[in-house]
Amino acid sequence: MALTATEVKQAKPREKAYKLADGAGLYLLVNPKGAKYWRYKYRYGGKEKMLALGVYPDVSLKVARVKHQDARLKLSQGTDPSEVRKIEKLTRHLASAESFEALAREWFNQLMPEKSKSYRDRTGRILEKDLYPVLGKRPIKSITAPELLAALRRIEARGANDIAHRAKQTAGQIFRYAVATGRAERNPSSDLKGALKPRNKKHYATITDPKEVGRLLVAMDGFEGTQVVKTALKLSPILFQRPGEIRNMEWAEIDWEQKRWELPAEKMKMKLPHIVPLSHQALELLEQIHTLTGRGLYVFPSARGRSRALSENGVRTALRTIGYTNEQITPHGFRAMARTILDEVLGFRVDWIEHQLAHAVRDPNGRAYNRTSHLEGRARMMQDWADYLDQLRASYEHGNVIPISSHYSSS
């Protein structure tokens, strides 16, 4: 039964502390000296936790219930109210000096929720490991370009040039936020153009020898994991799109009649809509997985719940399972595989290949091609590519060598 204001007021101390329950985890703790504390007991992540809501009479029964409902709302949204309390307390403490860390945490909480989990995690690591230890307690308006550069040089010193550039970009976004909200006058990161060592050029491991590609395809056929992961794995070389685009593929994006996969601009790295023509091999794989996942949002849902896409490590782990190391082939490496073989072996036009890879391709006048440019030719290329992969698989299984046929050339 819920408490009344009178019961709370008249609660007397006893030899031992005791609780008066108000319901849904809210209770009044009365200690032997007569002090009365509002507490909320709840479970989060399978563990029992407790949140302090204030001391009576400073916090009345009515106010305690308001705080209790606010905490329950956060819990229903998947947030631990105790962690929210800690962050708010830390932010208030740091904000008194308008420190870099205070502004960074405010910026992160304001703008990061809409970003992908992997991007949030990566940005969070850079802040916690590289920027807060050096700049965190400094008033943000006092930080100079040389001071920021010194922090970035520490990252470079361990050979992490790419992370140094990402840290500079992250710091720049925080400074811009501080300027926009009146806590700083300028962004010192803009003075550091050209001051960092060049990024490490990233090459994704891949396989381009036709015989070895055949060996890989046979190994993929033997993968004994879930149908969701196996289908994503087998579609990766056929479609050769970015791993994140494949694992986040949605059924609504598949045009069965036109035989193509249409990706909206917001999902693409270049922020332009993209079309991937689907070979009959790709369509067959999609039809098979449709019987399993077709009623959900994602073609490749997470094993943890259909409301989320397959983990970014799903296909990577599958490659490791069938015996291929990260130095031999990565999920992103299927793009380099297709790029090399379509050009050097099958002789397709480079602009078709680049367009199909969703790279920036421009016409002789410098204008960007739209998503339907050369679509008929690209559709033929995608079908020929899938056919060629089938032949490489069959060749490896039977020990034959496939001659390069002019059938595949677009010239």
Image (cartoon, rainbow, N blue to C red):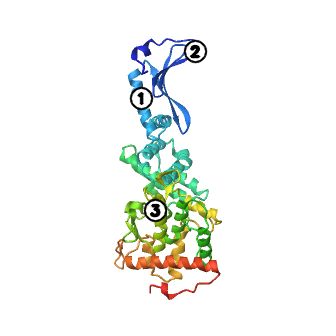
Q: Residue 263 in the image: x percent, y percent?
A: 40, 64
* Residue that appears at 44% across and 33% down: 71
Q: Residue 17 in the image: x percent, y percent?
A: 55, 17
* Residue that appears at 58% across and 53% down: 154
Numbered disc 3: secondary structure: helix
Q: Residue 134 in the image: x percent, y percent?
A: 55, 46
Above-or-below relation of 155 to 48: below
- Which of the two marks, 2 or 1, is nearer to us in this view? 2
Q: Amino acid at mark 3?
A: His
Figure quadrant of residue 372? bottom left
Instruction: State which quarter of the image contains the N terminus.
Output: top left
Q: Residue 236 in the image: x percent, y percent?
A: 52, 67
Q: Are marks 2 and 1 in contact (CB under 8 Å)?
A: no
User: Which residue in the structure is indicated by mark 2?
Assistant: 16
Q: Amino acid at mark 2?
A: Lys
Work out whether residue 85 or residue 379 is closer to the camera in this orientation and state it: 379
Numbered disc 1: secondary structure: helix
Counting residues from the start of the chain, the first of labels 2 and 1 encountered is: 2
Work out whether residue 291 or residue 10 is closer to the camera in this orientation and state it: 291
Q: Are marks 2 and 3 in contact (CB under 8 Å)?
A: no
Q: Which of the numbered marks, if any, corresponds to residue 67?
A: 1
Q: How many marks?
A: 3
For label 1, the crowd category at 10 Å Cα-Cα, with few meaning under 14, some 14 to 19 and many 20 or more, is some
Numbered disc 2: secondary structure: loop
Q: Amino acid at mark 1?
A: Lys
Which residue, as the protein is rendered here, is positioned at the far front? 291
User: Which residue in the structure is indicated by mark 3?
Assistant: 290
